[in-house]
């Protein structure tokens, strides 16, 4: 119960400290349950899907094991390819030839601990809730917690929307709701808890005689001892529903509606006399609360799904899912490693932004990207095992407590499975734990017996309970030690790293003393947490500062081996390798760019290397191909062209043949006030006008203005005539031509151009006055 309370109230368990605490609480509960020296000899029961969970955890552990590189190359070629840039380095033979089946061993181990705690919590819940009294009390307490959180979340939303439960100030751009930083995770939590609250609402419904009048029914209802409890749970259900609607989470709204409808469909099938009045009352209450807040923002969120211009669905999730499918195709059987979506996604990303996507916004797709088909099949087996057993028991059970709680749990699991199609709720600490709880609740509620004197559950007991108890105790104790050691060492290493940063910030220290102190602290951090590449990377920076290049290369290579998809580590190693092996340095810098989420920064680093090489012809060709594919790279690239002094031929060999591209470079030249040195850029810009999908008048006006300042009227006229061929209805072209002819003294042609301009823009009074004056002078 402490674990169930802690998970949502610790701000949704999204931070390292809260997840660490959650894992320890679960493990301690397991140690207490399976303690072999307890006087009471409990009976333990078989849990559906437990074998699938064991296989899943075993697969995650296997991903973390170091294997010979040739074996990894045979099993998962793309994982080997991820490590290949550092394995090929002849300057780093000490790195060895053993790699894991994951591109980030630390992330995979952290996921292993998180999922292990969920699996253990599932097993604990199944064993503890075989008592009907404990089962009912647990659901009541958890449901009351959900009502409490929902009520105060709405209150907090109205009074202090920029905080987390009034305690913590939100950073700008966060979409929090209640204790959760991410409002969709709050909605996911309520999707699971709402059917449980509904089950309490139905369970405590007063029984009324059908022959009575409406007045007699009302009197009988409020005279019943359970009416107050029934109304409380009804109010709680409305509050939960309203809070999800107020989050404006489209996936949350659809999922909670699916969960509630499924619950009522199951009730209607089980209880033929169940009317539509409870559902109608809930709907009216929901309408009242949400209408008070306003339906318009919610409806606007749903309207935004449809692209009014193209007529299709407009959502970046579709693009993320398409890229996730490409990852699955690249890692079909093994996946890239649990917890590594954030590492692998930039290499397959087609979205034209620099945002960091930590998850696929689809738990099923992410299971396949991280664990491959192996994990997908195992996960499917677990879900099918739990749902099949729950549905079978719901059909045959007659005890109201059992089947109502089982229906609530089934609706909770189904609602979350629907929501998992649109978001990553199962990767949230609290929501993942509650999903395991709901799965266990479905198993327990469907099998718990309320009135039997012989056996309190229909679950099959384990034949050798004491042997199982001892084995589970040892495994739980081992999990406790691993959790404490791994997470504790990470916390301690982070503390040493922060101390090193503080030393760096002290300006009074001598550089040599500062460097030595930082080296000592960073070496401690690296030794404590040997799975992270960050400390080796930071230490390599200090060694580079100390001009110890060989040590810096070795440390940087170690950082890449820990996290081979991290572009900063790859490009740091590439810079360090420049003087040792330029070819390998170029490969590392380009690979870092290919794997980066911040394409602009990583492209700059790679481009600087290519522009500093001599000769740089091949490098310029590679850069040009990238610029042709991604126009967003041009803006950070323009300053490098002047910084490295590229001549006319080199600029032409680098920039794509697009007028807009050359004008972008011209804008940079004007900022740097180098227009005379790079005048050829403006002169050549119109050579590529045929390649421009959208022609702008500015292109011709700017060129004509430049030529006129240089008294090159013929070239200015040529540029304007070219503009008229592409934009024949643009009046300012004729005005500029008229000015050119007037300056030449050819008033007749000037008048013709002005008249043409007036035909296109007859409301231009200034041009009308100029034309009359010119006609009078003539």
Image: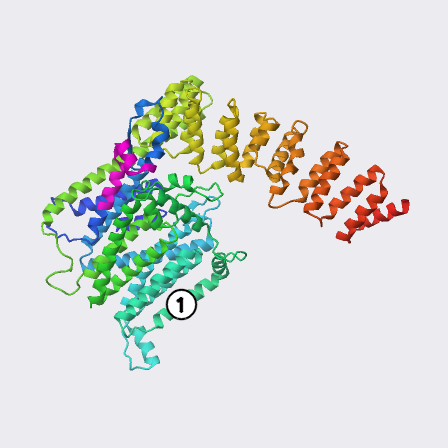
Query: Residue at (24%, 52%) from the top-left corner?
Result: 382
Residue 550 visible at all? yes
- Foreground pick, 617 / 735: 617
- Foreground pick, 643 / 34: 643
Residue 33 among those drawn in magenta: no
Residue where numbered disc 1 is placed = 283
Q: Quadrant of residue 684?
A: top right
Mark 1 packing: few (<14 Cα in 10 Å), some, or many (20+)?
A: some
Residue 535 visible at all? no
Q: Residue furthest right?
A: 777
Q: Quadrant of residue 572?
A: top left
Relative to 618, is 20 on the left or the right?
left
Residue 65 among those drawn in magenta: yes
Query: Residue at (66%, 30%) from the top-left corner?
Result: 680
Give the image location of residue 554, x and y in percent: 36, 23
Give the image location of residue 612, x and y in percent: 52, 24
Give the image location of residue 38, x and y in percent: 12, 46
Magenta stretch, main secondary structure, is helix
Magenta residues span 55-78
Relative to 669, is 614 on the left or the right?
left
Q: Quadrant of the C terminus?
A: top right
Secondary structure of the residue carrying tag 1 is helix
Query: Residue at (60%, 28%) from the top-left corner?
Result: 649
The colour scheme is rainbow
Relative to 461, is 725 on the left or the right?
right
Query: Residue at (50%, 28%) from the top-left corner?
Result: 619
User: Can you say whether 227 is above or below 604 in the image?
Assistant: below
User: Can you say whether 653 is above or below 192 in the image?
Assistant: above
Give the image location of residue 201, x and y in percent: 31, 66
- Foreground pick, 13 / 118: 118
């Amino acid at each position: 119960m402490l674990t169930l309370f802690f998970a949502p109230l610790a701000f949704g368990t999204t931070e390292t400290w809260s997840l660490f605490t959650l894992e320890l609480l679960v493990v301690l509960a397991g140690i207490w349950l399976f303690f072999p020296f307890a006087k009471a000899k409990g009976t333990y029961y078989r849990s559906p899907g437990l074998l699938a969970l064991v296989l899943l955890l075993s697969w995650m552990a296997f991903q973390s094991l170091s294997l010979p590189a040739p074996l990894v190359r045979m099993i998962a070629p793309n994982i080997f390819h991820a490590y290949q840039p550092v394995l090929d380095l002849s300057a780093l033979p000490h790195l060895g030839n053993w790699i894991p089946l994951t591109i980030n061993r630390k992330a995979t181990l952290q996921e292993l601990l998180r999922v292990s705690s969920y699996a253990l919590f599932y097993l604990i819940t199944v064993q503890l809730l075989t008592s009907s009294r404990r089962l009912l009390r647990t659901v009541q307490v958890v449901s009351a917690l959900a009502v409490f959180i929902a009520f105060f979340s709405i209150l907090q939303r109205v009074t202090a929307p920029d905080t987390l439960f009034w305690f913590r100030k939100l950073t700008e751009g966060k979409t929090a709701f209640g204790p959760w930083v991410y409002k969709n995770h709050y909605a996911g939590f309520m999707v699971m808890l709402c059917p449980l609250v509904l089950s309490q609402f139905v369970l405590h419904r007063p029984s009324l005689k059908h022959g009575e009048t409406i007045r007699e029914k009302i009197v009988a209802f409020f005279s019943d001892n359970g009416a107050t409890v029934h109304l409380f749970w009804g109010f709680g259900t409305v509050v939960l529903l309203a809070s999800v609607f107020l989050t404006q989470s489209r996936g949350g709204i659809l999922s909670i509606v699916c969960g509630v409808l499924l619950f009522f469909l199951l009730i209607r099938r089980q209880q033929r006399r169940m009317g539509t009045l409870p559902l109608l009352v809930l709907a009216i209450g929901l309408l009242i609360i949400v209408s008070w807040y306003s339906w318009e923002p919610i409806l606007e969120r749903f309207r935004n799904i449809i692209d009014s211009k193209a007529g299709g669905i407009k959502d970046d999730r579709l693009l993320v899912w398409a890229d996730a499918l490409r990852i699955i195709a690249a890692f079909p059987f093994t996946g890239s490693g649990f917890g590594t979506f954030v590492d692998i996604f930039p290499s397959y990303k087609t979205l034209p932004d620099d945002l960091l996507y930590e998850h696929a916004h689809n738990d099923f797709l992410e299971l396949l990207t991280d664990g491959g088909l192996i994990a997908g099949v195992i996960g499917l087996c677990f879900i099918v095992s739990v749902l099949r057993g729950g549905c079978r028991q719901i059909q045959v059970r007659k005890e109201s407590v059992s089947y109502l709680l089982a229906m609530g749990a089934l609706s909770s699991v189904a609602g979350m499975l629907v929501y998992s199609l649109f978001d990553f709720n199962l990767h949230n600490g609290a929501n993942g734990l509650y999903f395991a709880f709901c799965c266990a609740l479905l198993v327990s509620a469907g099998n718990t017996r309320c009135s039997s004197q012989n056996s309190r559950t229909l679950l099959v007991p384990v034949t050798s309970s004491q042997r199982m108890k001892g084995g589970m105790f040892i495994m739980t104790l081992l999990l406790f030690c691993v959790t404490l050691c791994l997470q504790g060492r990470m916390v301690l290493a982070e503390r040493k790293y922060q101390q090193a940063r503080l030393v760096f910030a002290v300006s009074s220290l001598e550089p040599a003393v500062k460097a030595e102190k930082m080296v000592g602290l960073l070496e401690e951090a690296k030794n404590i947490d040997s799975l992270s590449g960050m400390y080796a990377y930071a230490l390599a920076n200090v060694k580079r500062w100390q001009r110890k290049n060989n040590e810096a290369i070795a440390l940087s290579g170690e950082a890449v081996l820990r996290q081979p998809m991290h572009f900063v580590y790859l490009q740091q190693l590439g810079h360090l390798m420049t003087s040792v092996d330029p070819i390998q340095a170029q490969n590392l810098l380009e690979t870092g760019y290919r794997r980066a989420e911040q394409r602009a920064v990583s492209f700059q680093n790679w481009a600087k290397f290519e522009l500093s090489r001599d000769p740089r012809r091949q490098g310029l060709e590679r850069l040009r191909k990238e610029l042709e594919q991604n126009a967003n790279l041009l803006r950070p690239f323009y300053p490098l062209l002047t910084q490295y002094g590229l001549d006319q031929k080199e600029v032409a060999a680098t920039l794509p043949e697009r007028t807009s591209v050359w004008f972008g470079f011209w804008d940079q030249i004007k900022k740097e006030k180098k227009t005379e040195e790079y005048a050829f850029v403006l002169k050549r810009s119109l050579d590529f006008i045929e390649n421009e999908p959208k022609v702008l008048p500015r292109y011709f006006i700017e060129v004509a203005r430049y030529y006129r300042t240089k008294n090159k009227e013929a070239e200015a006229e040529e540029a304007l005539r070219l503009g008229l061929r592409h934009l024949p209805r643009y009046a300012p072209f004729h005005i500029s031509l008229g000015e050119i002819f007037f300056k030449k003294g050819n008033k007749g042609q000037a008048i013709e151009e002005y008249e043409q301009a007036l035909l296109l823009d007859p409301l231009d009074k200034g041009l009308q006055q100029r034309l009359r004056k010119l006609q009078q002078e003539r």
